Amino acid sequence: MDQGKTVVVGLSGGVDSAVAALLLKQQGWRVLGLFMKNWEDDDTDAYCSSRQDLIDVMSIADSIGIDVEVVNFASQYRERVFAHFLAEYQAGRTPNPDVLCNSEIKFSAFLEHALKIGADRIATGHYAGVREFQGKFQLLKAEDGTKDQSYFLHRLNQQQLAMSLFPLAGLYKREVRRIAETAALHVALKKDSTGICFIGERPFKEFLMRYLPRKKGEIRGLDDDRLLGEHDGVAYHTIGQRKGLHIGGVKGGKAGESGDHDAWFVVSKDIASNTLYVVQGHAHPALLADELRAGDLSWVAGAPPHTHWVYTAKTRYRQPDAACEIEHVDAGKCMIRFAEPQWAITPGQSVVVYESRVCLGGGVIE
């Protein structure tokens, strides 16, 4: 079908990208594998899996019968993704570096390199889809809703989508593993990687402390301004966080006294005074909001969608789609109003808008 055309597949060492490469070869593409090295700071650390991943990539390539190139994008990653990540945390926001990694590295630096070595297309093992519709390329949700990664790809533009293939768009994860087993790929049962790509499985606060110094401050109750404890730095905490506050769950009186043991949740951060504010109970009204303002907008079609139409959106990856309307699109900002209040809307995270299965794009929550 695509005999003679070259596709460069980003191989991570996992089962998804391995099966993506296998399927494309079976379709008749000339497949080249590319392993991206994006992080160098702690290669020997117990949490860094890049060495094992590269070994797995070489084994996958040998099994499928394709060549592999290893490319180091660490300097681009530090400049385009990690510097932004640290600046956002320092400013008290909670960024999503995987979104930036996709738009700036996997579908930018990687795409540029692939074109230089003669690629007609690039491909990844993302669970998402792309199609051409009425002269525009659309980003689609994957068939497997539990694995859909369109949220992380929402900043891709028309040029990037035109060059991209997502072979796993119509497959469920169990089918992907079955294909890998049938092809005797040794990564068929390899555990999925989780978390932010350069942090891996390591404790998040421990990682952040390497780059952002401790700055002790007060933890106070939002409702009564009562002093509840102390934190090591507001940058280490995020809206809706429950674990790691070390203030117990006691309402009324002093810590240690009997009372209502509802959990405490971070609700806001005052950077100027270095104060962390918390509320008690998952359903506290201060944790709910029915609107948000977003900036740094990026729309897949190159233009904003219609205002006052009913869409759906999500303000974090693992969240059901929520009915909403878009209002006041101007100067790279918009308001999004939800039909029902949303929990723990977090500045710095991405809000991503959908129309049925089509991902329209989104922006950064302000």
Image (spheres, rainbow, N blue to C red):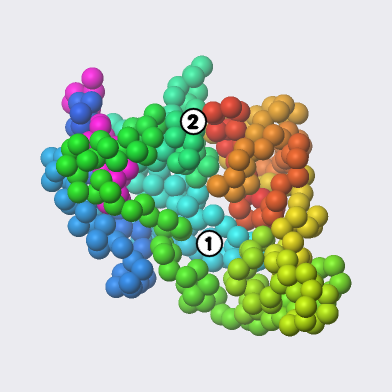
Count of numbered badges drawn on the protein: 2
* 173 is within the stretch colored magenta: no
In the image, the segment drawn in magenta is 1-24
Location of residue 191 in the rendering, given as x and y in whole percent from the top left corner? 33, 53
Q: Could you tell me which secondary element the residue under label 2 belongs to? A: strand
164 with respect to 265 (left or right): left
Residue sticking out furthest to the front:
258
Residue 136 lies, with reference to residue 213, above or below; the image says above
Q: Is residue 28 left or right of residue 48?
A: left
22 is within the stretch colored magenta: yes
Looking at the rendering, which quadrant does residue 262 occupy?
A: bottom right
Mark 2 Cα within 10 Å, few/some/many (few <14, many 20+)?
A: many
- Asked if marks 1 and 2 touch (Cβ < 8 Å), the reply is no
Quadrant location of residue 30? top left
| Location of residue 366 in the rendering, given as x and y in whole percent from the top left corner | 69, 53
Determine crowd level at label 1: few under 14, some 14-19, many 20+ residues with C-alpha closer than 10 A: some
> Mark 1 — residue?
85
Q: In this view of the protein, which residue sits in the foreground, 304 or 277? A: 277
Tag 1: amino acid = Phe
